[in-house]
Amino acid sequence: MTPTHFTFSAAFILGLAGLAFHRTHLLSALLCLEGMMLPLFLALSLWTLELNATNFSASPMLLLAFSACEASAGLALLVATARTHGTDHLQSLNLLQC
């Protein structure tokens, strides 16, 4: 495993660990998701540059567009949750409640 691959894998695993272990606030969960998407974007970008493949050159931009849509939907949910529940604690959200 090259140092570049190790760095991207470690960054992705750290984001996944943060998402698994620090689930107190919705904002921290969203930041962990963004922290997982950034190494994926960088690895996909470097992969297309290393292969010199022009047919995969749109893949990083597509991933970045989906990541931006995910971030905006997450922030909209954060604002809606803060307005209705008064906090962004994940423990206060009850999905069984109408």
Image (tube, helix red, strand yellow):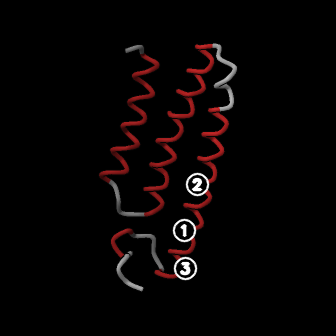
Judging by the rendered image, the residue that carries numbered circle 3 is: 83
For residue 90, which quarter of the picture? bottom left
In front of the other: label 1 or label 3? 1
Judge left or right: residue 23 versus residue 36: left
The circle drawn on residue 77 is 1
Rounded to the nearest whole Å, what is the CA distance between mark 2 and mark 1? 10 Å
For residue 17, which quarter of the picture? top left
Task: Determine whether the residue tagged by mark 2 lies in a helix, strand or loop.
Answer: helix
Label whose residue precedes the other's in the sequence (2 or 1): 2
Location of the N terminus (image quadrant): top left
**Label 1 CA crowd tier, 10 Å (few <14, some 14–19, many 20+):** some
The circle drawn on residue 91 is none
Residue type (three-letter) at the residue carrying disc 3? Arg
Task: Determine whether the residue tagged by mark 3 lies in a helix, strand or loop.
Answer: helix
| Residue 38 point in image, percent of width and height | 54, 38
Q: Is residue 24 above or below residue 15?
A: below
Rounded to the nearest whole Å, what is the CA distance between mark 2 and mark 3? 18 Å
What residue appears at the point 38 percent right and 30 percent down from the top-left corner?
Answer: 10
